[in-house]
Image (tube, helix red, strand yellow):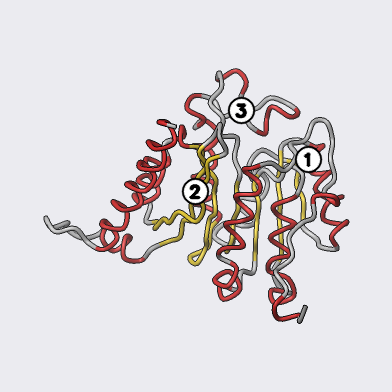
Amino acid sequence: MPAETMPPRIAQIRLVSSHPQVYSPCDDSFALVDALLADRTKLLDHHPSICMEIGTGSGYVITSLALILGSESKNAHYFATDMNPHATTVTRETLEAHGVHAELLTTNIASGLEKRLSGMVDLMVINPPYVPTPEDEVGGSGLSSAWAGGENGRTVIDKILPVADSLLSEKGWLYMLFLAENDPSHICLQMRDKGYGAKIIVQRSTGEETLHVIKFWRDPDIQMEGNEVVSGAKTAPQRGFDFLRSQISRLSFRETRQ
């Protein structure tokens, strides 16, 4: 097959390291990587200098991102964090097995990097703990920290979003995965209030879960709109958000009926 027609590389499951206390790649991981693949041309044109994953787990996503961007983004620098020390060890092994590199930090969300990377991250990917669980399960050690999301699965998500906002550059893009139960429409409205546009990149039902990978970016039109007196007529960003919310609601409603 000619080189120009070969599909972009992603992490190979057989080369992804593992540990009993580390979340292995699953449907949500695959959905997030599929979103990056779907946006690959835009990502290459975006020329991100600093890329980051919060909650790296096995390293499947950050490794896939480095491979997707490849030599065309040779100046990109990668960071990955996880509060589980086994996860950062496994991620290092996964990266090395694929011949790519990231700076790894065992920490909660991005503690220790917030000043260093403030306003500098051009591309961020997050598969957060999104499963609705009792609050006392949130932030536990080991494997449960990868999925335990508290009430409506939002406890950790609501802590991550302000951190992401502080780290993203003016041209920063955030790809984040949500469960229907997380109320992604409400999250999009919250991000809109901070001046972000949003777009669904991947929607997927796994039988047990309805997943949404949503891309957020700083939208000058929305930011300008927030500084103006809003008239009765809806602006283009407002119409876009109405459409986004209808798409999320329609998919979630359809899946709950099946």
User: What amino acid is at disc 3?
Assistant: Ala
User: What amino acid is at disc 1?
Assistant: Ala
Residues at discs 3 and 2 in contact (Cβ within 8 Å): no
Residues at discs 3 and 1 in contact (Cβ within 8 Å): no
User: What amino acid is at disc 2?
Assistant: Gln
Tell me the residue that label 2 is attached to: 203
Label 3 vs 1, first from the N-terminus: 1
The single residue placed furthest to the left in the displayed view is 232
Say what secondary structure mark 2 lies in: strand
Q: Residue at x 54, y 34 (%)?
A: 209
Query: Looking at the figure, which quarter contains the C terminus?
Result: top left
Label 2 vs 1, first from the N-terminus: 1
Q: Which of the labelled discs sits on residue 104, or is there none?
A: none
Query: Looking at the figure, which quarter contains the N terminus?
Result: bottom right
Label 3 vs 2, first from the N-terminus: 3
- Residue 107 position, x and y percent, is 71, 40
Q: Residue at x 36, y 41 (%)?
A: 249
Question: Based on the displayed image, in which of its 4 quarters is residue 46 positioned?
Answer: bottom right
Q: Residue at x 62, y 57 (%)?
A: 117
- Residue 242 position, x and y percent, is 28, 51
Is 57 or 106 nearer to us in this picture?
57
Tell me the residue that label 3 is attached to: 148
Q: Residue at x 65, y 61 (%)?
A: 51
Say what secondary structure mark 1 lies in: helix
Q: Nearer the viewer, mark 2 or mark 1?
A: 2
**Label 2: few (<14), some (14–19) or many (≥20) C-alpha neighbours in 10 Å:** some
Q: Which of the labelled discs sits on residue 87, or is there none?
A: 1
**Label 3: few (<14), some (14–19) or many (≥20) C-alpha neighbours in 10 Å:** many
- Residue 214 position, x and y percent, is 48, 51
